[in-house]
Image (spheres, rainbow, N blue to C red):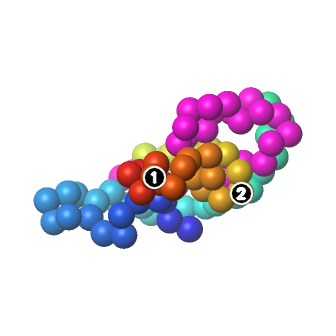
């Protein structure tokens, strides 16, 4: 699964190198913070967790719901 955003990068933009990506659906046991909207993910809520190595650095992102960007409006997703 890929991150929301444009399907390509312009030539002047150096696209990040993603070596590994893992997407999991989890149920929160304690509060987390959503990567997209910065609102809390409460215990008991389902969230998506992404782990990736981006440009040699490990990253973990947590998003509300099962669909990434579920907490964002359609306009916000387009601008993302």
Residue 16 shows in this picture: yes
For label 1, the crowd category at 10 Å Cα-Cα, with few meaning under 14, some 14 to 19 and many 20 or more, is: few
Residue 40 vertical placement versus 4 (above, below): above
Report the quarter where the N terminus lies.
Answer: bottom right
Where residue 71 sits in the image (x, y, percent)? 62, 46
The reply to whether the magenta stretch includes residue 54 is yes
**Camera-side residue of 39 and 74:** 74
At x 61% / y 38%, what residue is drawn? 34
Mark closest to the chain's N terminus, 2 or 1: 2
Residue 60 shows in this picture: no
As helix, strand or loop, the secondary structure at mark 2 comes to loop
**Camera-side residue of 40 and 19:** 40
* Range covered by the magenta-colored residues: 31-56
Q: Is residue 6 left or right of residue 77?
A: left
Numbered badge on residue 9: none
User: Disc 2 versus disc 1: distance between alpha carbons?
Assistant: 19 Å
**Which quadrant of the figure has residue 8?**
bottom left
Residue 76 vertical placement versus 31 (above, below): below
Where residue 15 sits in the image (x, y, percent)? 28, 60
Numbered badge on residue 66: 2
Q: Is residue 34 left or right of residue 4?
A: right
At x 47% / y 59%, what residue is drawn? 4
For label 2, the crowd category at 10 Å Cα-Cα, with few meaning under 14, some 14 to 19 and many 20 or more, is: some
Which circle, 2 or 1, is nearer the viewer?
1
Q: Is residue 72 left or right of residue 15?
A: right
Where residue 73 sits in the image (x, y, percent)? 54, 49
Q: Residue furthest left?
A: 12
Where residue 64 sits in the image (x, y, percent)? 67, 46
Q: Which residue is mark 1?
A: 75
């Amino acid at each position: 699964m890929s991150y929301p955003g444009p399907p390509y990068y312009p030539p002047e933009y150096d696209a990040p190198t993603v070596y590994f990506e893992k997407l999991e659906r989890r149920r929160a046991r304690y509060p987390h913070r959503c990567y997209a909207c910065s609102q809390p993910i409460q215990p008991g809520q389902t969230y998506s967790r992404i782990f990736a190595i981006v440009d040699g650095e490990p990253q973990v992102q947590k998003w509300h719901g099962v669909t990434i960007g579920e907490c964002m409006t359609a306009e916000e997703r387009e601008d993302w």
